[in-house]
Image: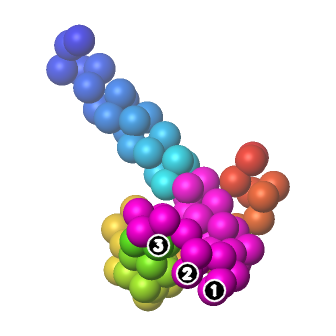
Amino acid sequence: MSPEDQPAVLDDMFEKINTLDGISVYFLRRLLKQTTEEELAAAEWQFQSVLGWAKNHLLPRIDAGLYRRLKPSCTNDTLEMVAG
């Protein structure tokens, strides 16, 4: 790959990463909304850990604008928006 091609490749790669991040966060939020406290308490430790990290660390950081690749507005994403 020539140096002239790299910026376009990197821009395209970052656009895809941002799209995938947004889709992942949408489904993570959806999972957390659909999971009851009882279901979470009964889950295996690794699921409790990942969902707890998402609920208590990742999503609050995104909502506060502290996550560099996702804007807080992604909180309002719909299935149609992420499937787009």
Residue range corresponding to the magenta coloring: 22-47
At a point 55% along the width and 56% down the height, the residue shown is 24
The reply to whether the C-beta atoms of the residues labelled 1 and 2 are less than 8 Å apart is yes
Q: What residue is pinned by disc 2?
A: 41
Instruction: Find disc 1 in the rendering and name its residue.
Output: 37
Say which amino acid is labelled 1. Glu
Task: In the rendered structure, find residue 84 and report the number of the disc placed on it.
Answer: none
Estimate the x, y position of residue 3 in percent, counting from the top left: 18, 20
* Numbered circle sitting on residue 48: 3
Closer to the camera in the image, 34 or 25: 34
Query: Tag 3 or tag 1, which sits nearer the N-term?
Result: 1
Please determine whether, in this image, residue 4 is positioned above or below residue 42.
above
Name the residue type under label 2: Ala
Task: For residue 53, say whether it is visible.
Answer: yes
Question: Mark 3: which secondary structure?
Answer: helix
- Disc 3 vs disc 2: Cβ atoms closer than 8 Å? yes
Residue at the image point whose x is 63% and y is 86% from the top: 37
Gap between marks 3 and 2, in whole Å? 7 Å
Query: Mark 1 Cα within 10 Å, few/some/many (few <14, many 20+)?
Result: few
The three-letter amino acid code for the residue at tag 3 is Gln
